[in-house]
Image: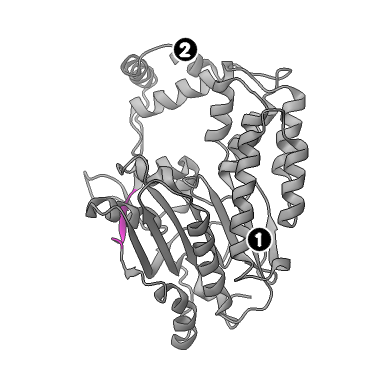
Amino acid sequence: MRVEPAVPAEALAAIRAPLEASGANQADAPLLQPLNLLLDLAGEAMRARLFVVQAEGGTESCLRPDFTVAIARQHIESGRAAGLYWYQGAAFRASSGSDRPEEFVQLGLEMFSPGGGAVEAADAEIAGLAWRAAAAGGREDLSLWLGDVALFGAFVESLDLPETLAARLRRVAGRPRLLWAELSRTEQATSDGGTLAGLLAGLSESQAAALLEEVWALAGVEPVGGRGPAEIAARLVRKAEAASAPALTEAQSDAIRAFMAIDDAPAYAFARMRELAGANDATLKAALVGWDARLLELTRVAPADRLRFAPALGHAFDYYDGITFEVRSEALGAERPVAVGGRYDSLLTRLGGAGDARAVGCMVRPWRAWTGGEA
């Protein structure tokens, strides 16, 4: 396993200082994390980037790829409505086909709060802390890239699409491969979703799983890995249902593509969104007003000319449902951000927390932030 070099203690302390000064409690997370939970959150494609561990006869686990999910689970188990935690420790992700480190240090901060009230101040606070921590490493070529998963939902709403189609687009907003596939599935070009998927569509979950097991038995196939027949059948059924669902018109697909291609200074980006929006744009306009409040706070921390907005900004894990952000170094490029983060309210519900709970956090890579580190 390729291990990231250590950052000098003095530089590491400077990068960590803004997070510690926030008043957060220090937290840690188990080294082993439940594999199936992380795959449910990030998609099966994430498996190739995880270090999977399995004792004989036991369930599959993986070395922790990050801290957010683990700390969110710990917060929920604590029973507290609010919490602020910072962490520092090793994370592990496989890096096939490159020489990047597979074990590396992360610093981060997670903020949890009860429902109610505006989120803009908390969003700006966490993004600002990520910027300050990244900048403390000494790099002078940093920029703060912003996005918002919720803006995509508001834009889709403006187009007055059938609800089933709009819901599907919102679900895949954080997964570029699935989103582009949906945008290509216009009224002029649809598919049946696959023969097996089509056969399973319309069956109950237990019936679909039983049929799939029968097919495996006839073919002499022995399934490998943690996915059972019920889960695989459910995914195939969703694939078939999606293929037969209403499709976008060419004009709608073009509008969404143009929206996702926006990459500009925030003011120009928001003006372009208003131009592209459909008639039902009240939710989008309200969301953009909220962004005015965030930008007012962020420009007190980061120079206005270092801010960029790109609706397509996303991360490896697709649990983000609001603001997303990255601190990038010009020398390192977009593929190696110095810091990332965003809002993930719905993750708490998926983990068993209160339905109205709020959460936003950030993660910083000290080796990338330090001027003597990654080049």
- Give the total number of marks visible in the rendering: 2
Q: Would you say residue 31 sits in the magenta stretch? A: yes
Residue 90 is a magenta residue: no
Q: Position of residue 196 (x, y in %)?
A: 48, 17
Q: Is residue 35 left or right of residue 55?
A: right
The structure residue drawn at horizontal position 68% and vertical position 63%, both measured from the top left corner, is: 307
State the image coordinates of residue 225 (x, y, percent, origin top left). Answer: 35, 39
Residue found 45% across the figure and 77% down from its top: 16
Q: Magenta stretch: give its range.
A: 29-34
Residue 139 is drawn in which quadrant? bottom right
Asked if 261 appears above or below 134 in the picture, the reply is: above
Image x and y of residue 310, in percent: 68, 51
At horizontal 55% and vertical 74% (from top left) the residue drawn is: 132
Residue 334, labelled with which disc? 1
Q: Which mark is residue 199?
A: 2
What SS does tag 2 mark? helix
> Which residue occupies the foreground of this view, 126 or 241?
126
Q: Is residue 262 visible from the viewing direction of this image?
A: no
Q: At numbered mark 1, what does the secondary structure look like: helix, strand or loop?
A: loop
From the image, which quarter does the C terminus lie in?
bottom right
In front of the other: 115 or 266:
115
